[in-house]
Amino acid sequence: VDLPVKEGDYVNRGDVLMRIKPDIYNAMKDRASAGLVSAKASLDRNESEYKRAQDLFRKGLIAESELEQAKTSFDMSKAQHDQAYAAVTQAQEDVRKTTIYSPMVGTISQLNIEQGERVLGTSQFQGTNVMTVADLSRMEARVEVGENDVVLISLGDTARIEVDAMSNRKLNGVVYEIANSATTKGLGTQEEVTNFQVKIRILDKDAGLRPGMSMTATIETETKANVLAVPIQSVTARSDMKKEAPQGGGDEEEGGEIAMNEKIKEKAQKAKEVVFYVSNDVAKQTEVKRGISDDTYVEIVNGLEEGKEIVTGSYKTISRDLEDGVKIRVENNKMKKDKDDEKQ
């Protein structure tokens, strides 16, 4: 019956948000109050009779059974009075709830009703969601993280947030909650994905954010400074292959082993991670140990000296085609020479 706010309004704690029709609740309150008055009168009468019965019993003028009867009537009246008082308290609470006050300082971010509409709110049924009050000064980002990556995230990790509506700005945040239960999409299908929700508190104030905006976040699980790093595509895995001469003999009936003996057997040792660097226009392979990485670079803990010129290229070129000792053409040197010629 009264809706003094509209969507986008700023409200303080205790401001009136809405009023619902209180007629039925006022009637229930009046009935409960009348019941309390009647219960109080009955209690007073039975209390007086009980006290008089006590005096008469002490003087020996009535039997003990009459005293017990008076006490029982008094106790019943007292219980009825307490019940009536509780009914009045409940009715007053119901009337109080017909006026809804803001529980917090914030902004009306969503308003789902108009004045005059019906709303429902009882202890048996879920209430009507009439509006949302949000504190826009304390925003959080919620992202879905895969099960393989969530184990790397810890509370307090720094996050860089990119909002689709603010393409020219990055916001800072910190991880403050990691879900313990997974959210599975496409259960039982080939597209089944298991994610965990991670909540990030946005540290930037007055960022102009609105609830429901789309965003992506990069969570920094570890940070190192002044390290040796190479492009991530320059690190590849290689195995040392050993060829064995074909072995004669054997019986064709022994599970076809003779067919295997006629082929060259290759025994692969454990794959190792390597990087190719340039030395006199020749690609040299060196085994390395990697550390942390991001989307572009990977840290080299050992196996490579600073200042080496690293070979980069496509995945197929680095992982399959490139071999130790092959001659290569250094494109960046040629480009540098051409630029120097232009300057001259």
Image (cartoon, rainbow, N blue to C red):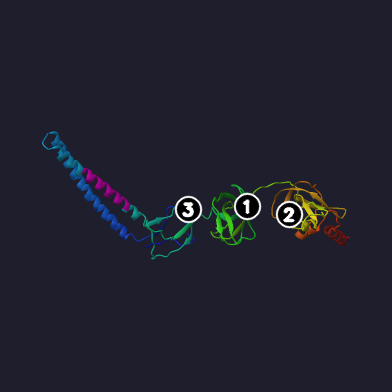
**Quarter location, residue 31:** bottom left
N-terminal of the pair, mark 1 or mark 3, is 3
The label shown at residue 149 is 1
Name the residue nearer the viewer: 155 or 19. Answer: 155
Number of other residues with Cα within 10 Å of mark 1, as a class: few under 14, some 14 to 19, many 20 or more: few
Question: Disc 1 and disc 2: Cα gap in Å?
Answer: 18 Å
Mark 2 lies on residue:
232
The circle drawn on residue 105 is: 3
Q: Position of residue 289 (x, y in %)?
A: 75, 47
- Expressed as whole percent of the image width and height from the top left, the position of residue 103 reads 44, 53
Which residue extends farthest left? 61
Q: Using a 10 Å C-alpha cutoff, classify the residue at mark 2 as few (fewer than 14 neighbours), some (14 to 19) or many (20 or more).
A: some
Q: Which residues are magenta?
A: 74-90
Q: Give whichever of 21, 2 is nearer the camera.
A: 21
Q: Tell me which secondary structure the magenta stretch mostly adopts.
A: helix
Please name the residue shown 21% across and 45% down the image: 43
Q: For the point 60% across and 54% down, which residue is it?
A: 145
**Residue kind at label 3, given as amino acid type:** Val
Q: At numbered mark 3, what does the secondary structure look like: helix, strand or loop?
A: loop
Q: Mark 2 belongs to which amino acid? A: Ile
Residue type, label 1: Asp
Q: Is residue 80 above or below residue 134?
A: above
Residue 335: say if magenta. no
Which badge, 2 or 3, is on the more N-terminal residue? 3
